[in-house]
Amino acid sequence: MRKKKIWIVIFVCLFVFTSYVRPVDAGRYYYSGKLKGGVSGRTWAIAQNTYNLYGRTVNYYDAALNAIYNWNSINPTTTSNVDVSFSHTSNFSSATLKFVIDVQEDVFWDGAAAYFDSNNNPMNPYSDLGDWSSAVICFNAYYTNLPECTSSMLKALAGHEIGHTFGLDDVTLTSDRYKLMWYETGPYRASGITTDEINWIRIIYSN
Ligand SMILES: [Zn+2]
């Protein structure tokens, strides 16, 4: 009886320990993979510039472009390999980052990123080992065409999803709610990159 109890206590402690450590350690800021080939001198494209829904035409090209401008401003002098630079291409299939617009009702996500290897097979950023060659960012117009989603929020969402494709994970602790990688679109998420995202990108791409 006594031995059994001890094992149960050990098991519970182990579970609490692992479930506590993971989110505040590596899993909190980065995925296990990143964008293969780095974030310098890459291309981006968008499947369609605007989308009409609820009688509103939303300019997704501008949101993506402004988010890219923001990321392109990260040019640390100390580590040249994290000099983020993305240029627009009209060649959609060849782009490293591809933006698409879709309508998914009641799914509770307004933006999502998908990751692909060099053969265009999908990759799971948590469980698949290795880095991805390209990524697709999807705006869910079911939410993002609503008037509540301001152009500033849309740009922040684009920047946030770009952060995912670079290898950054969501941050979910309340103390992190003013960062770009805050998981939820709304009044808290930063409208642009904060010093934390800059530091995490430096860590990910400088080794
Ligand atoms: Zn996210």
Image: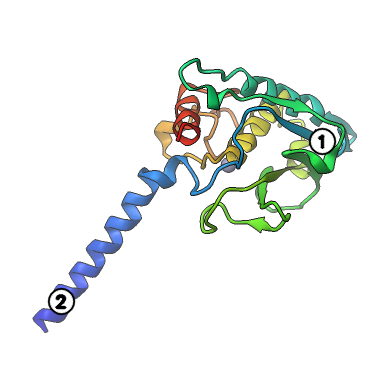
* Image quadrant containing the N terminus: bottom left
Three-letter residue code for mark 2: Lys
**Residue furthest out toward the bottom:** 1
**Residue furthest out toward the left:** 2
Mark 2 or mark 1, which has the lower sequence index?
2
**Which is closer to the viewer, label 2 or label 1?**
1
Report helix, strand or loop for mark 2: helix
Q: Does the beta carbon at disc 2 come under 8 Å from ligand 1?
A: no
Q: Left or right: where does residue 39 sit relative to residue 52?
A: left
Q: Is residue 54 above or below residue 154?
A: below
Three-letter residue code for mark 1: Ile
Q: Name the residue tied to disc 2.
A: 5
Q: Which mark is residue 46?
A: 1
**Residue 20, percent across and down?**
32, 52
Report helix, strand or loop for mark 1: strand
**Residue 173, percent across and down?**
41, 39
Would residue 185 be seen by someone viewing this image from the given angle? no
**Residue furthest out toward the top:** 77
**Residue 205, percent across and down?**
50, 33
Answer yes or no: do the residues labelled 2 and 1 have beta carbons within 8 Å? no
Q: Left or right: where does residue 183 sit relative to residue 118?
A: left
Answer with the quadrant where ligand 1 appears in the image: top right
| Crowd class of label 2 (few under 14; some 14 to 19; many from 20; radius 10 Å) | few
Taking depth in this image into account, of 142 and 179 the one nearest to the observer is 179
Q: Residue at x 69, y 51 (%)?
A: 118
